[in-house]
């Protein structure tokens, strides 16, 4: 684990897509978030201190949070089990800091320990994410599996340590549960069987990789 023993080191987050199937934590481009309401919520708390980013997000980067094992039929190898995928918007941290007082006040906890429950800290990704970003867990959007394939939109995948960290953050936000990293397996069952031998790894990946090898 990384700073404060609460999140991975920056170099343990991103990697070029390698899997024939989708994994929770995969990063996609041009995901539609434009139908989310942004004008209803003006303040989070009675003292007027904002905690959640409610600014407009039209098309942007999205982080897949559908559980890995729920996307592929466990009895018919290679078949998707259902056509629905849940993603959350990935927003530049600087933009969030300008608009959300609580995040600005606690940015050290976010960077060092990823301790803000409603967000997932994401370091820069060469050629894709310019600077620090956060995934907003409180703003999920539902899209079709087909949308992620036509055209191919996957640009990166999380490394195992960061994928496990994402599961911990999802449990904390949606279940208000504290999960210890060592209680979760580092890799998915049968993960290596999904490793592709050539580029593109799958129908979700463009003909030319966006992330350096």
Image (tube, rainbow, N blue to C red):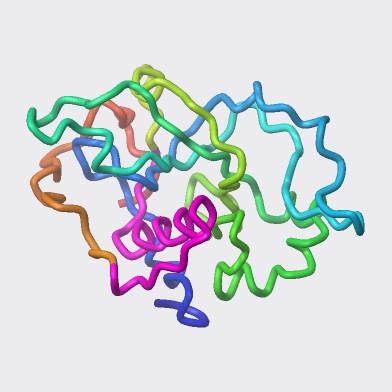
Residue 164 located left or right of residue 48 = left
Residues in magenta? 155-183
Residue 190 lies left or right of residue 127; in this view the side is: left
Residue at left offset 53%, top offset 37%: 61
**Which residue is at a point 30% across and 52% down the rendered structure image?**
213
Q: Is residue 71 above or below residue 63?
A: above
Image quadrant of residue 42? top right
Q: Position of residue 21 (x, y in %)?
A: 22, 36
The image shows residue 205 at horizontal and vertical percentages of 31, 31
Q: Is 167 colored magenta in this rendering?
A: yes
Q: Residue at horizontal 59%, vertical 53%?
A: 134
In the image, residue 174 above or below residue 58: below
On the rendered structure, is 70 left or right of 42? left
Say which of 189 and 162 sits in front.
189
Check the image and name the residue furthest to the bottom: 4
Q: Can you tell which quarter of the image residue 207 is in?
A: top left
Q: Quadrant of the N terminus?
A: bottom left
**Residue at 8% from the left image edge and 46% from the top image edge:** 193
Taking the magenta stretch, the answer to whether it contains residue 66 is no
Where is 5 relative to 98, above or below? below
Q: Is residue 75 left or right of residue 152?
A: left
* Above or below, 212 relative to 79: below
Q: Main secondary structure of the magenta part?
A: helix
């Amino acid at each position: 684990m990384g700073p404060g023993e609460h999140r991975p080191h920056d170099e343990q987050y991103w990697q070029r897509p390698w899997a024939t199937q989708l994994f929770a934590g995969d990063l996609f481009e041009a995901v539609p978030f434009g139908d989310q309401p942004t004008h209803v919520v003006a303040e989070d708390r009675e003292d007027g201190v904002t905690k959640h980013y409610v600014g407009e997000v039209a098309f942007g980067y999205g982080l897949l949070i559908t559980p890995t094992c729920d996307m592929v039929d466990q009895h018919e190898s290679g078949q998707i089990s259902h056509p629905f995928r849940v993603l959350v918007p990935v927003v530049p941290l600087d933009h969030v800091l300008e608009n959300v007082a609580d995040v600005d006040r606690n940015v050290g906890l976010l960077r060092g320990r990823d301790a803000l429950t409603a967000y997932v800290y994401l370091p820069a990704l060469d050629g894709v994410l310019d600077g620090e970003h956060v995934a907003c867990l409180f703003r999920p959007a539902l899209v079709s599996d087909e949308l992620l394939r036509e055209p191919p939109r996957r640009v990166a995948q999380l490394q195992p340590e960061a994928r496990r960290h994402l599961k911990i953050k999802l449990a904390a936000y949606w279940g208000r549960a504290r999960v210890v990293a060592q209680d979760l397996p580092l890799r998915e069952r049968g993960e290596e069987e999904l490793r592709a031998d050539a580029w593109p790894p799958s129908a979700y990946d463009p003909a030319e990789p966006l992330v350096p090898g």
